[in-house]
Amino acid sequence: MKDSELIDVMRNWLPIHVYSRKQAIADGVQVLANPDTTKEAGIKFPVYFTQTAYNKYVKVPEGMEGMQDEDARLWDIFTMFKYYARGSDSNQITFKVSVSIPDGGNWAPNEKYEPSTGRDQRLVTLFSEIGHFDFDNPSPAITIMIPGED
């Protein structure tokens, strides 16, 4: 079989399974960032976080209520995302942001201790991808996750 014939055959293949963004949102696997904060930060496309990244880095940790606010944490992440995105020509960007999290021994591989700021401050590496909103919707959307997540 020639390469061109194989390509024609492959074009007719159907995926065995597709997990859409709509399903991920309904399942709670992805979380939409506050659209008002997203717009205010100057980001034109909707931003979604994986549940893991959102719960650990956007939501205010227990014990920090009153000292922190979810929109401010989101703003910090957006600021660093935009800083790294400006210097990139890729749709995938790895970036770092400093995040306050009480030190409960729950350090992850993408977190680094910052000695000058104390044990409650972590330098966190996040990964973002700009792509289609979903399989049936080609409009752009941004997904922010922990490196290694899908």
Image: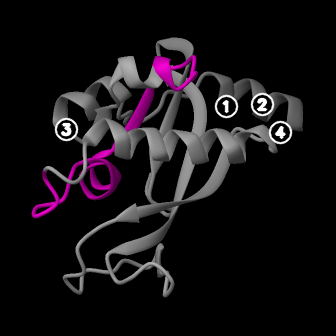
Residue that label 2 marks: 7
Task: Say if mark 1 contacts mark 4, CB within 8 Å.
Answer: no
Alpha-carbon distance for marks 2 and 1?
A: 5 Å
For the question of whether residue 130 can be seen, the reply is: yes
Q: Given the image, on which type of amino acid does mark 3 rest?
A: Gly
Q: Which residue is mark 1?
A: 10
Q: Nearer the viewer, mark 2 or mark 4?
A: 4
Tag 4, which secondary structure? loop
Identity of the residue drawn at 47% across and 73% down: 110
Task: Say whether residue 84 is left or right of residue 108.
Answer: right
Of label 2 and label 4, which has the lower sequence position?
A: 2
Instruction: Report, in whole angstroms, how far the alpha carbon at label 2 lies from the one at label 4.
Output: 29 Å
Looking at the picture, does residue 116 appear above or below residue 29?
Answer: below
Pick the front one: 52 or 105: 105
Q: Amino acid at mark 2?
A: Ile
Q: Is residue 68 left or right of residue 38?
A: left
Pointers 2 and 1 in contact (C-beta within 8 Å): yes
34 or 102: which is nearer to us?
102
Q: Position of residue 105 (x, y in %)?
A: 23, 87
Point out residue 56 in the picture as x, y percentages from the top left corner. Answer: 28, 58
Can you tell which mark lies on residue 28?
Answer: 3
Q: Is residue 46 visible?
A: no
Relative to the observer, which residue lies in front, 52 or 112?
112
